Image (spheres, grey):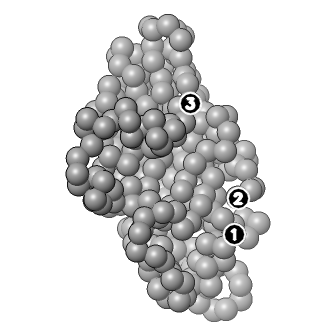
Amino acid sequence: MLSFLLRNTSSTPLFAGFITMVAASTMVWLPAHAHPHVFADARLELSIDKDGMVEHLAHVWRFDDVFSSTVLMEFDKNGDLILDQGELDTLSKTIGDSLQEFNYFQTIMDNSHDVKMHEPTNLRADFIDNQLLILFETKPAQPLNVKSGHVVSFGIYDPTFYTAIDFLTDEDLHVDGLPEGCHAVVVRPDPDEALAQNQGTLTDAFFNDPMGTNMSKIFATRLELSCGAKK
């Protein structure tokens, strides 16, 4: 649940449209070439029912101090250095609208096929210890059973490369209700190895404009679940 994730989110150290908007309004210059400008630590809790069906994914992202301060300055309309509930609501809607185009940075795969997810109904922004937090839950649009015999994976990645969202420790990817006989492993791809392994499927379009394709997910840290197979 989100409350679990919030209690356990690390305090250490988006959405290209949102970042660009904030950067432009505060005169922050963003280079045109693709590399991260914003950093966030993530936690993910995956809930599975007794039949192996994925119930929901709960996300918490905690952003770096610099970006958090920039967001505060942009959305603090009354200048009191605190975001009241109305200002947080505006921020939450802005972020939700921006992330919608990118499937909320979720990379969910069932046997290498993309899994469509419902839009979150409860995405909200908050500030704790002067850092921006984004919290939301999503669920598969169609039933997703981790006991299907497929490898099912769950990850977070910004296809625009503007935001580096990652999990500081493997424990930040948590499974609640992992069925007996199923195994969970955290995969952290090496970029060079990922490119080499996928060379045959990567097109010129990816190398010319990786932001214009969906293949950036090969770099994403992910949680892989397999059932009925050896570790």
Q: Residue at x 40, y 16 (%)?
A: 147
Badge 3 vs badge 1, beta-carbon distance below 8 Å: no
Front residue (pair 93, 13): 13
Relative horizontal placement of residue 157, taking residue 176 as reference (left or right): left
Relative horizontal placement of residue 160, taking residue 87 as reference (left or right): left
Snapshot quadrant of residue 153? top left
Q: Secondary structure at mark 1?
A: helix
Q: Secondary structure at mark 3?
A: strand
Badge 2 vs badge 3, beta-carbon distance below 8 Å: no
Percent x, y of residue 43: 61, 45
Can residue 221 be seen?
Answer: yes
Percent x, y of residue 23: 50, 81
Residue type at mark 1 is Asp
Residue denoted by label 3: 186
Residue denoted by label 1: 65
Percent x, y of residue 222: 50, 36
Q: Earlier in the sequence, mark 2 or mark 3?
A: 2
Badge 1 vs badge 2, beta-carbon distance below 8 Å: yes
Binning the other alpha carbons within 10 Å of mark 1 as few (below 14), some (14 to 19) or many (20 upward) gives: some
Q: Earlier in the sequence, mark 3 or mark 1?
A: 1
Name the mark on residue 13.
Answer: 2
Front residue (pair 184, 54): 184
Residue type at mark 3 is Val
Q: Earlier in the sequence, mark 1 or mark 2?
A: 2
Check the image and report above or below for 148 versus 60. above
Work out how far the residue at label 3 is from the one at label 1, CA to CA, in angstroms: 27 Å
Q: Residue at x 38, y 55 (%)?
A: 159
Binning the other alpha carbons within 10 Å of mark 3 as few (below 14), some (14 to 19) or many (20 upward) gives: some
